[in-house]
Image (cartoon, rainbow, N blue to C red):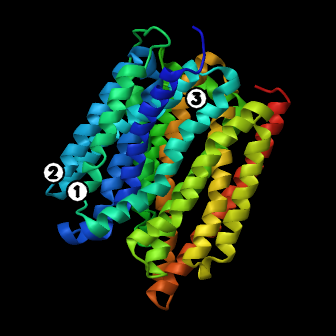
Amino acid sequence: MEKRVDLKLILAIVAAGLLSFCGVIVETAMNITFPKLMREFALNTATVQWMTTAYLLVVAIIVPISAFLKRRFRTKTLFVTANLLFILGLVVDATATSFPVLVTGRIIQGLGTGIALPLMFNIIIDWAPARQKGTLMGIGTLITAIAPALGPTFGGLIVSWMDWHWIFVLLIPVLVISLVLGLYAIRQAQPTVKVGFDVVGWLMIVLLFVGFTIGFSKLATITTQPLIFVAWLVVGLIGLVGFVIRTRRAAQPLINLAIFTTKSYDLHLMAYFLVQICALGLAFILPNYIQLVNGKSALLAGLFVLPGAAIGAVFAPLGGRILDSLGAAKPVLTGSTILVIAMALFTVLGMYLSGGLILAIYILLMIGIGLTMGNTMTSGLQQLLAEHQADGNAVFNTMQQFAGAIGTSVVSAVITLVQVQTTGTSAHRTALGSTMALGLLLILVLIELGTMILAMKTRQAGQR
């Protein structure tokens, strides 16, 4: 198979990328609508959050089996299935008149997103020449990384001028374009293999992510209901231990655990996980800060983070191109350092963040993410043998979803706990809670920088 960048490869990446983009943008756009949905359906905060939690759960359960799906089914078949599932979910939500129906639509969308997310990167892994892989991975990362920042703007525009149902309606044409492009451009790299499906292993994955996702969603009530939080974490741990034991014994495991014997890959994965927590945690903190502390509208909350999203989008493929030319260390370590500086500024100025300050610091932060995120994944996958890269990609995409659930849950819990335990105006308590959450994210990006320095030393030493 000759690997070259041609029109079909570009269109295939765009087709799969649009599908992943829609999955992420709906998630972040709907966060803006929570107050409206709570009033319309007479729900409390814990209940309305299930619209996101159920979606993330389904995605997290499907993504880990992507390596099996890649081996068993044709790429185009997977793409069409994912696209049609997502369109069906959009139609269900666009016509939803009750909250259970709305959640059902989000679950269907989660099935589509869970198949689609690893698909784009698998297409790049299969078809991109080694000398251009970083650039193309950067383009793929651009598509998914820009969505969390664009989502609040998109959701704010819809909520300000239209009914929330239009968030789903307006994405249907995008999915149709994606479907047409994919039908034309997506090709098969390797023949499919009739491998068995490890049902027990998959059930352990379900336990793992149900336990941890629901557990972390209960973090805000840890002071009043600690046993519930601990119980769900125990369920997650049972799933994790059970999955490892089952996978070691299975003849055809869902994920080959041999990838975790490569130290440099493990370090890249940990760093990627920490960056994702930071990015998605900020996607929760900043729009809420702008609305609840600065008293701005949902639309302005989205617009203040929009320039950073655009600049981060530019730096994602640029960072990939630097990796192709100069190696991974320069863009990744530069980006990680920028992340630390930006998070330090957010933390130090946490009680006094104006819209202008948020805009400026977020631009700096998104430059760091643009240089770091895609390149960390590309560099990490390069540490694995070719036959293990589909498994490595599945784990990277799984960790992305898990980081989303944890990042949002942890920062919202920190803000809620500070609000409950402090006095003053609602705006003051929210600002204080946000500052504490930003401080936590600063610690995580400092750990990420140290992890990447160690990963690069391990890589340069030639250790697999």
Kind of residue at disc 2 = Thr
Q: Who is closer to the viewer here, 43 or 201?
A: 43
Between discs 3 and 2, the one toward the N terminus: 2
Q: Quadrant of the C terminus?
A: top right
- Counting from the top left corner in percent of width and height, residue 176 is at 29, 35
Q: Quadrant of the N terminus?
A: top right
Vertical relation: 400 (above or below) 185 = below
In the image: residue 222, left or right of residue 38: right
How far, Cα to Cα, is label 3 from label 2?
Answer: 38 Å
Between discs 1 and 3, the one toward the N terminus: 1
Q: Which residue is mark 1?
A: 165
Whether label 1 touches label 3, CB < 8 Å: no
How far, Cα to Cα, is label 1 from label 3?
Answer: 37 Å
Residue at disc 3, secondary structure: helix
Between discs 1 and 2, the one toward the N terminus: 2
Number of residues whose C-alpha sits closer than 10 Å to that of mark 3, classed few (under 14), some (14–19) or many (20 or more): many
Number of residues whose C-alpha sits closer than 10 Å to that of mark 1, classed few (under 14), some (14–19) or many (20 or more): some
Q: Which residue is mark 2?
A: 95
- Counting from the top left corner in percent of width and height, residue 85 is at 27, 34
Whether label 1 touches label 2, CB < 8 Å: yes
In the image: residue 172, left or right of residue 62: left
Residue at disc 2, secondary structure: loop
Q: Residue at x 38, y 44 (%)?
A: 22
Number of residues whose C-alpha sits closer than 10 Å to that of mark 2, classed few (under 14), some (14–19) or many (20 or more): some
Can residue 381 be seen?
Answer: no
How far, Cα to Cα, is label 1 from label 2?
Answer: 7 Å
Vertical relation: 389 (above or below) 266 = above
Q: Who is closer to the viewer here, 233 or 220?
A: 220
Can residue 131 be seen?
Answer: yes
- Counting from the top left corner in percent of width and height, residue 196 is at 39, 14
Kind of residue at disc 3 = Gly
Q: Which residue is mark 3?
A: 392
